[in-house]
Image (cartoon, rainbow, N blue to C red):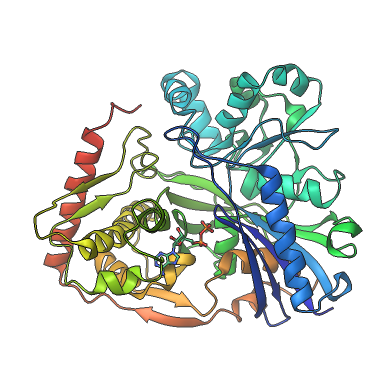
């Protein structure tokens, strides 16, 4: 059979892509997904719209390339992680809006939990920093706020899923309620090594009956129901978007790392079969497994990266398109001392401050649009340096280079500034859609479409390498300025947990 189909459900859009036997992207279609912001710090989506966007993009893609279900060896699914859907097992209807990973509504609950006796146990078992980011407190919120939900969940009437689980449940007409370790490890209900954990379920008071079965990231779990994609297609790969991107970058071995520049920024370092413990406020997480053996990674998550560019476009109207930010930023030699800390939903790693909010500092009479646009792009690079520094400290050695991908990685100004501010080379592959590619890899490996990871490694090609060109003094001066701006942004917030 000719293709692997990848379904890549991101925060801002649902995409579908086809790959041939050489791992080449044959085509991609996408449909937008709407985020709702009903209160400051709250972010929601309509799970039914997410499903519609995903299935429409897949159908459109297959039509455009005249690919029928019989041309597709298997499909892989990758998804925005942590986003929480709870639905009625019988009707399939969500009982509440999906609570998106960025949503801060459970920040107070999490702050209290972190201070409690259970706090240390949660972190030790899950490898996570206690934060509203992860699914458990979001499930708790739904059970607390939807009338009757707790009793129905106990009776097995309600199901929980992240977006992977939800899409698979829809694709199989309710036959499969499953997830994989890379997604499960982001719920805060999983012991990083062994699986769903009764102590964690007790702490969050979440009935086990709601939880999906954890299956391998790479393995045939079942097939899509014929009605959705014109025939049954084996579902053979599942991974959270960042772990899928790690696979798509062919980072299958310890010591290899990537950074994805999407809505947020996510740097992951593969640690192989070794369970990492971060001493620098990064997360320990499960990588996608390519066989039955558990694989691990260290991760640094920044909540707002490309979303700062989106904000300049949609909320402020300073730019017409994300792409034009590159030329606008390059039209001035520096930000003229302006820093932009886009802490719209607090700060993620390594600060973990849910109460911080965004700040623009250093504005003068001469400050113009280009300086602010440039400061927004630079903020992405500064935040990444914070992650990489922690990662290097955890790993005990410097990164040799950083592989990059995601929507904003096409921005050459940003990539050069990233190499400069990091003092490390940045390497961009030919195919920056590594999330979709990674899910395809997992599905292809499971079905013999590809032989082994060595074959996948042979597909990886650099498109461009960005070498650091900035002097050490300028680099450190600029970075110190960033620290001052972050300190001000945090000083304006209530003390964090
Ligand atoms: P996600 O998977 O999180 O939805 P993507 O990887 O599709 O995100 O990246 C989209 C993000 O990248 C958006 O936030 C957008 O503002 C940003 N982006 C897209 N193109 C550019 C560009 N040329 N320069 C800077 N940012 C960009």
Examine the image and state in which quarter residue 93 appears: top right
Please, which residue is most extreme toward the left here?
365
Horizontal and vertical percent for residue 44? 56, 39
Indicate left or right for 386 with 305 as reference.
Answer: left
Horizontal and vertical percent for residue 25? 65, 78
Q: Is 152 situated above or below 127?
A: above
Horizontal and vertical percent for residue 304? 40, 50
Examine the image and state in which quarter residue 140 appears: top right
The foreground one among 116 and 79 is: 79
Horizontal and vertical percent for residue 385? 31, 58
Indicate left or right for 213 with 310 as reference.
Answer: right
The foreground one among 112 and 41 is: 41
Q: Is 60 situated above or below 288?
A: below
**Camera sees residue 303:** yes
Specify the quadrant that holds the C terminus. top left
Q: Is 197 situated above or below 172?
A: above
């Amino acid at each position: 059979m000719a293709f692997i189909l990848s379904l890549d459900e991101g925060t801002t859009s649902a995409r579908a892509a086809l790959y041939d036997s050489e791992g080449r992207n044959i085509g991609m279609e996408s449909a937008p997904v709407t985020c709702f912001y009903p209160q400051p710090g709250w972010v929601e989506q309509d799970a039914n719209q997410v499903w519609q966007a995903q299935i429409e993009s897949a159908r459109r893609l297959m039509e455009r390339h005249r690919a029928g279900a019989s041309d597709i060896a298997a499909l892989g699914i990758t998804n925005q992680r942590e986003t929480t859907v709870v639905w009625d097992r019988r009707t399939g209807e969500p009982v509440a809006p999906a609570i998106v990973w960025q949503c801060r509504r459970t920040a107070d609950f999490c702050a209290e939990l972190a201070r409690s006796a259970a706090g240390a146990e949660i972190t030790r078992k899950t490898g996570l920093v206690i934060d509203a980011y992860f699914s458990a407190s979001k499930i708790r919120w739904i059970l607390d706020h939807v009338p009757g939900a707790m009793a129905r969940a106990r009776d097995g009437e309600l199901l929980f899923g992240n977006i992977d689980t939800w899409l698979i449940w829809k694709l199989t007409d309710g036959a499969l309620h499953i997830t994989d370790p890379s997604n499960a490890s982001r719920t805060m209900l999983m012991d990083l090594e062994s699986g769903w954990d009764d102590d964690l379920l007790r702490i969050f008071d979440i009935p086990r009956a709601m939880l999906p079965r954890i299956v391998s990231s790479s393995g045939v779990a079942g097939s899509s129901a014929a009605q959705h994609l014109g025939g049954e297609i084996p579902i053979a790969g599942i991974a959270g978007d960042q772990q899928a991107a790690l696979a798509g970058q062919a980072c299958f071995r310890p010591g290899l790392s990537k950074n994805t520049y999407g809505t947020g920024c996510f740097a992951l370092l593969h640690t192989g079969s070794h369970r990492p413990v971060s001493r620098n406020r990064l997360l320990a997480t499960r990588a996608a497994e390519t066989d039955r053996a558990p694989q691990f990674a260290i991760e640094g998550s920044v909540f707002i990266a490309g979303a700062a560019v989106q904000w300049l476009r949609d909320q402020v109207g300073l730019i017409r398109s994300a792409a034009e930010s590159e030329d606008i930023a390059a039209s001035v030699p520096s930000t003229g001392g302006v820093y932009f800390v886009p802490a719209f939903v607090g700060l993620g790693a390594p600060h973990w401050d849910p109460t911080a909010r965004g700040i623009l500092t250093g504005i003068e009479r001469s400050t113009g649009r280009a300086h602010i646009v440039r400061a927004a792009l630079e903020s992405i690079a500064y935040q990444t340096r914070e992650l990489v520094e922690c990662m290097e400290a955890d790993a005990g050695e410097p990164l040799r280079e950083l592989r990059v991908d995601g929507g904003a990685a096409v921005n050459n100004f940003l990539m050069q500034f990233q190499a400069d501010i990091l003092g490390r080379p940045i390497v961009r592959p030919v195919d920056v859609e590594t999330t979709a590619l990674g899910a395809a890899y997992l599905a292809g490996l499971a079905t013999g479409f590809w032989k082994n990871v060595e074959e996948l490694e042979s597909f990886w090609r650099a498109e461009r390498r960005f070498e650091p060109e900035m002097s050490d003094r300028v680099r450190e001066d600029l970075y110190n300025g960033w620290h001052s701006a972050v300190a001000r942004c945090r000083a304006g917030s209530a003390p964090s947990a």
